[in-house]
Amino acid sequence: MASEPVLQVELNVIGQELSYNGIPKPIPQTYWTDTLVPLMYPTWDTDKDKLISFYYYSNGTYTAKRRKYVMNFKTNTNEWKDYEMEQVASSVADTFKDKLVEGWYAIDAIENTEFQNELGAMYAKANAVSPLSVRLARDFLLTETDWALGNDSPLDADAKAQYTLYRQKLRDVPATPEFSTNVEGTKFPISPDFYNKIYKTENAGNDYLATDDQFLPLAAHYLKRYGDRMAHYLLTKSFTEKAYFDVLLQEYNKLPETNWKPNELTAAQKVDRTNFLNEIIGIAAKELENETIGLYQDKYTPPSE
């Protein structure tokens, strides 16, 4: 009995993501613009018919979907229509697949060397919201709340349930209609902290994330206002243990009663350094959260009479 074909390569154009053997990689904007866009044009992507996805399987078959803007003569309105692209020569599809695999490995290499720096520069200089930047903002917010569901979390069962729902809604962001049709209008869920401190006081009858007004289009404002902080946070969180020990060495040596020796780290000293870094990150994250609450408060605070 023949085995089912396995998906090997997936290009998600809308989400700007490339997967190989089930491992997804967000595509850096520079690599997307300079390499992948010219690769797709004009065989796969044209001015009128835009490629939205490409799937290549282990048996050498593929499917590709396009989207075009057409007139609906029944309603006399224009609308987007998705359709399966006609087949091209197998050699052309194989070449495209091979180029995508090369791209996946190139992105993987970038991640291991300079990708985090590129993300920082991207956030710091962001002038427009893109699917990649929204996805990374989502990842930042997920990372920021990892603590809530840990074994040592101080939250009770109800609070953990709220954070579980919040994190699931964040994961669902790329699947929302706004993400694929109007990325700047992509809506983010309000956090449990904001719900309990601000929203619930004026909307006591609404359960957490059960109403549309608890999802707000923060993408453009959030990314542009907090770009630098998000970049620095992501970069810091991506450091290996050795890297952040090196970066924080001078500051740590200023702490009282420290007997740190470069080549004689004990388990307790490693814990001290880890806690020190997490404390710095926690302070920065709390400051960001407080300022974000201030933004929301403008929306929900009724005007004074």
Image (spheres, helix red, strand yellow):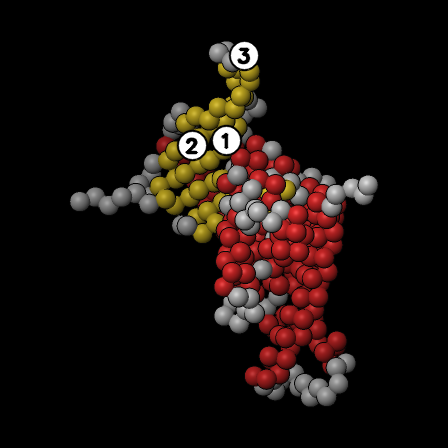
Q: Nearer the viewer, mark 3 or mark 2?
A: 3
In the image: residue 122, left or right of residue 58 = right
Q: Which disc number belongs to residue 197?
A: none
Element type at mark 1: strand
- Which residue is labeled 3 in the image? 76
Q: Residue at x 62, y 55 (%)?
A: 196
Q: Is residue 83 above or below residue 36?
A: above
Quadrant assignment for the N terminus? top left
Residue 235 position, x and y percent, is 65, 60
Label 2 belongs to which residue? 64
Circles 3, 1 touching at the beta carbon (< 8 Å): no
Give, as a three-letter code, the residue at label 1: Leu
Residues under numbered marks 1 and 2 in contact, where contact means CB atoms less than 8 Å apart: yes
Measured from the top left, where is residue 66 in percent x and y? 47, 28
Residue beneath label 1, please?
51
Q: Amino acid at mark 3?
A: Asn
- The residue depicted at 36 percent of the width and 44 percent of the height is 7
Query: The C terminus appears in which quarter of the rendering?
Result: top right
